Amino acid sequence: MTLNDSMKAHVPTPKKWWESAIHIVGWCILIGAPFFFTGHNDEMHADVDFYFRHFIGLLSFIAVFYLNYFLLIPKLLFSKRTGQFFVSNFLLIMLAMLFVHVMMLILPQPPKPFWHHAREIFDVIGFILYNVFLYILVIGMSVAIKMTAGWYQVETIRRELEQKNTEAELQNLKSQLNPHFLFNTLNNIYSLIDIDSAQAQKAVHGLSHLLRYVLYESSQPTVPLEKEIDFVRNYVELMRLRLTEQVTLTTDYSIENNSLPVAPLIFITLIENAFKHGVSNDEPSFINLSIHQQEGRISCRISNSYFPKDKEQDKSGSGIGIPNLSRRLELLYPSRHIFTYGKEGNEYRTVLDLQTK
C-alpha cells in the first residue's frame, strides 16, 4: 500500500462531509451577494441581467477553483511538475476570461454598464491585469485549502502512528514488568520457605490474587485508583510475612476519589525496591509508605533504610525496574509527573507525584 493509499484509507468521513459543507456555504454566500449588498435605489440594482452577469463571473471562478482543487494541484503541483502547473493555469485563466467576455457580449447590455466606469479609470490592459489577479487569487485559495486538507490528513496519520507506537512501547514495557514482578515475588517467597513454611503457603495463596490483577486488571490503559491501592495493600501484606521484628513497616493510604483513573502497576516498582534494599535481617530497618490523593493529584512517598544488595546477593531481577518506570511515566504522564529518588543520609527517599487531570 502506498502512502497516498494509506492517506485515503485513514481520512475520517466526517472531515469530508464538513469540507463539502464549507464549500457549499461559501459559494452560496458569493452567489447571493448581489441580493444583500446592492440597494434597490442604486443605479445598478440587482435586476435579472445584473445577476446573470455576476453569476457568469462567479461561475468562471468556481471552474478555475475546482479544476485546480481536484485536477491540477494533485496531478501536477503535488507531483512536482510545477512548470506544467503554471502553464496549465495560464491557459485556464485565458479560457475563463474568454468565456466571460463572450457571455457578456451575448447578454443584453444594461443602460449604464458597470464596466463603463471601470474603463474610464483603467485602460484595457489594466482591466485585464486586474481580472488576472483575481483568478490568481482564486488559484492561490485553492492551493492553500488543498494543502491544508493534505496537511490535516498527514497529521492525522502521524498522530495515529504515534499513538500506535506509544501503545506498542507501553505494552512492551508492561511485558517486561510482569515477569520482573513475578520473579521478585517468587524470590521473596523462596526466602520465606526457610523461615516459616506455613507462612510461605499463605504467601503463595496471596500471590495468586496479585497475579490475577497483574494478568487481567492491568491489561487496561487505566484502572480505578481503588483497585491499584488494593493491589499495593495486598502486596505489602504479602511482603510483611517475611519481615522480622527488627523491621518497622508503616503504611498510610488517604484516598478521596476511589474511581479516579490511574495507570496500573505504576507504584509497584518503587515498593519492590523499598523491600529489596530497605530490609536487613541483621540490623534494625524500616519502610514508611504513604499514598495520598487529593482532587486530580496522587502522591506516593516512600522512605526506607538503605542496605544495597551486591550482584551476588541480588537474585531478584535484572535492574530494569526504575528505567522501565521512568519511560512509562514519560509516555503516560508527560509534563504531569514528578519523580525523584536517591539516598539522603542513612535513608533512601522516593517521591512520585502524578497529575491525572
Image (cartoon, helix red, strand yellow):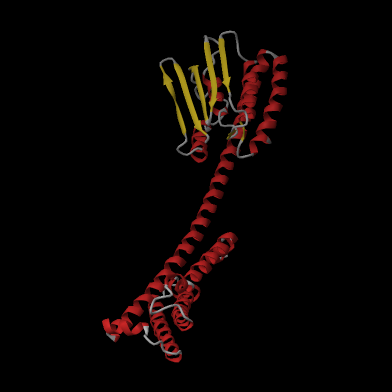
Front-lying residue, 219 or 357: 357
Residue at 66% across / 13% down in the picture? 195
Furthest residue toward bottom: 106
Q: Is residue 314 visible?
A: no
Front-lying residue, 62 or 156: 62
Residue 350 lies, with reference to residue 158, above or below; the image says: above
Quadrant showing the N terminus: bottom right
Residue at 46% across / 20% down in the picture? 348
Report which quarter residue 269 is drawn in: top right
Horizontal arrangement in the rendering, residue 291 relative to residue 219 (left or right): left
Furthest residue toward front: 41
Q: Is residue 297 visible?
A: yes
> x, y percentage for residue 138?
41, 73
Residue at 44% across / 81% down in the picture? 50
Report which quarter residue 279 is drawn in: top right
Q: How many marks?
A: 0
Residue at 52% across / 39% down in the picture? 332
Horizontal arrangement in the rendering, residue 310 relative to residue 137 (left or right): right
Horizontal arrangement in the rendering, residue 85 relative to residue 230 (left or right): left
Front-lying residue, 338 or 140: 140
> x, y percentage for residue 95?
42, 86
> x, y percentage for residue 237?
64, 18
